[in-house]
Image (tube, rainbow, N blue to C red):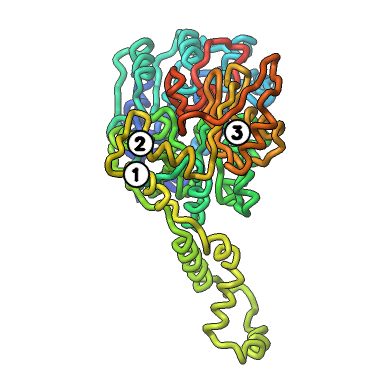
Amino acid sequence: MTNAFEALGLKAELVQSVADLGFTTPTPIQEQAIPVLISGTMDFVGLAQTGTGKTAAFGLPLLQLINAADKFPQALIVCPTRELCLQITNDLMDFKKHIKGVNTEAVYGGASISMQIRNLRQGVQIVVATPGRLIDLIERKAIDLQKVKYVVLDEADEMLNMGFRDDIDFVLKNTINRESIWLFSATMPPEVKAISKNFMTNPKEITVGKKNSGNVNIDHQYFVSPANQRYETLKRLIDFNPGMYGIIFTRTKADAQEMCERLAKAGYDIEALHGDLTQQQRDKVMARFRTKALQLLIATDVAARGIDVEGITHVINFELPDDMEVYTHRSGRTARAGKSGICISICHTRETFKIRQLEKMVNAQFHKLDIPSGKDVCRKQFFHFMDKLIHADISNGDYETYLPDLMTKFENVSKEEVLQRVAALEFDHFLKYYENADDLNARMDSRAPRDGQRADMNGSRSERTFNSRDNGYTRLFVNLGIKDGFYKASFLQFILDESNLKKEVLGKIDMRDMNTWVEVDKAEAGKMIKAIDGKRYNNRTVRMNEADGGFKRPNDEGGGSGAGRSDRSEGRKRTYAPRERKDY
C-alpha cells in the first residue's frame, strides 16, 4: 500500500520513519503545511487545534531541510512547557530514525543546565526549548542563534498567555539570519497577530477548521451547581462515569492539591500536577498517568499545557477559566487523533453567561445536563461492573479445577442470590454513600426568583437569601485581604489555625485587596468569630463579624468582581526579567 506522505515531497527516509510509526495518511494540517514548509523560505502561520498532528507538520520538513554535516543549531523550536518540549523532542527522535548525523537537544527549566550546555557543545542541529531556559543559555553565551535558519513557535497563543511575549520578541530579534518563521497556534488572539505583523513577511496562513474553534469530536457538557456543592458535584460526575480516564482542571495550585487530597482520601486513583512540583515529581506523575496507573490527573492550566496523552476520555473544568480562550486548550486534551471525547464544566448560576460566550467562541453547542442522582450513580456503577463481569477473560487460568468445589459450596444458593451477594460486595460503599444523597438539581431549582421578586445586577433576592441563610452557612466579614499578603490557601490556613476548626466547616471564600468574605457553618460561626475577632496580625487588629445585609458580594466593595486574581493564575503576564525566568 502506498504511503500518502510520499506525495507531500518528503524524502524516502522520513516516509519510512512515518510508516514505522503506523501512519500512512497525513492529517489535514500535515497535508496542507508540509508542502509549503519543505521549501524553507516562506513564513508560515498554522491554526489548528491540539491533537491534530502539528509536531509532524513542522518536524518532518525541518528534518528534511537540516544539513547533518553542519554541527551547529540550524533550527529552533520554542514551546511553552517542559512536557511539550520533551514530547516534541521524542517525536523528532522517532522521525529521524533513518537519518544519520542529526542531533536534537531539549532545553528546559528544572533539568541540569550544565548538562544541556555540554550536549549543545557536542554539536546539535535542532534545539527544542522553553523560553526561560533559552534566555538563560543566550545570556551565558552557551548557544549561538546567529546561524539559525528556521524558528518554530509551537502553541504560540499559550506562550503569550503565560507571559512570554518579551522572551519571544527577544529570541526573534536575535535570530537575525533566519530564513523563515513557522508559527503554530490553536487560536489567533491579537498578540499572535502582532508577532505575525512585526516579524513575518507575507506569511502563508493555513487554518484547519474555523479560527478559534474547538474540536468537532468533543461533546461539550455543563452542570449548574451551588458554589458550596462543587466538590460533591465533581465526585458524583466521576462516579457516574466509571470508565473515565481524564484530567480535572482547577484555577489554582491550592485548589488542585486540596481536591487531590480529598479525592485520594475517598479512594480514587488520582494525583495533582502543578507548578510547585519538581521536574522529577512531575515526570513520575505523568509516567503513572500515561500508563493508566492513575485514573485521574488534577492540574492547573499552567502545569497541564502541552500534555499529550492518548485515550483521555474526559476533561472536567472544576471551575470555568477566567480567560475564555483557555477553555479551548483545556478541552483539547481529549478527542485527540480523530477520537471523540467529553468536556464537562461545573459552573454556578451566575456563570451561565460564560457558556453562551464559549458556544460562540468554539462554534459548538453546549449541553446542559442534570447532576446525576444518587440512584443514577449506583445504577451506572452496577451495570458497568456487570459488563466487566460478563466480559472477564477466564481463558488464562485453570478455573475448571476449582469448579467442583465451587459447585458444592453454592449448591444450596440460588443464582439470583449469588448475583445479589456479588453486587453487595462490590457496591456496599456506594449504596451507603448515595442511599440518602441530596438531589443537587432540586437545590439549584430552589434558588430561582419567586413571583414578585425582582432580580438586580447582583442576582435575585432569593439567591442572596440562599447563600447567606438557607445553605447552612453564615457569611462572615474579615478585614484582611490580598494586600495583607494572603492568597486563598494561606488565608484558609490562618483562620483554621486560629479557630482550631476543620476545613469542612467552610464554604465559599471571596477575597479582595483589603477584606474577605467567608462562609462558615452556622453551628461554628460563633466560635470562629470569638477566636479571630480582636486578634493582632501585622500590627493590625483583626475584625471578624457577620456580614450585614445577607449575601454581600465582592462587587459591593468596588473594583470589579471575582476572587483575588493574584491567586487564580500561575504564569500570567510578567515583566521581562530574563534571569528570573521560571519554566513551567
| Residue on which the image places disc 1 | 448
Q: Is residue 391 above or below residue 580?
A: below
Earlier in the chain: of badge 2 and badge 1, it is 1
| Residue on which the image places disc 2 | 460
- The answer to the question of whether label 2 and label 1 lie on touching residues, with beta carbons closer than 8 A, is yes
| Quadrant of the image occupied by residue 476 | top right
Q: Is residue 181 above or below residue 357?
A: above
Q: Report the amino acid beneath label 1.
A: Ala
* Residue 439 in picture, x, y percent from top left: 44, 55
- Indicate which disc residue 254 carries: 3
Q: Check disc 1 and report its element: helix, strand or loop.
A: loop
* Residue 44 in picture, x, y percent from top left: 35, 22
Q: Report the amino acid beneath label 2.
A: Ser
State the CA–CA distance, disc 3 to disc 2. Answer: 31 Å
Q: Check disc 3 and report its element: helix, strand or loop.
A: helix
State the CA–CA distance, disc 3 to disc 1. Answer: 32 Å
Earlier in the chain: of badge 3 and badge 1, it is 3
Judge by depth and name the residue closer to the eye, 269 or 104: 269
Q: Could you tell me which quadrant the C terminus lies in?
A: top right
Badge 3: how crowded within 10 Å, few (<14), some, or many (20+)? Answer: some
Query: Which residue occupies 67% across, 28% down?
Result: 532
Badge 1: how crowded within 10 Å, few (<14), some, or many (20+)? Answer: some
State the CA–CA distance, disc 2 to disc 1. Answer: 8 Å
- Indicate which disc residue 215 carries: none
Query: Which residue occupies 61% across, 27% down?
Result: 544
Earlier in the chain: of badge 3 and badge 2, it is 3
Judge by depth and name the residue closer to the eye, 330 or 350: 350
**Is any part of residue 16 visible from this angle?**
no
Using residue 373 as the reference point, say whether residue 292 is left or right of it.
Answer: right
For the image, the number of numbered tags is 3
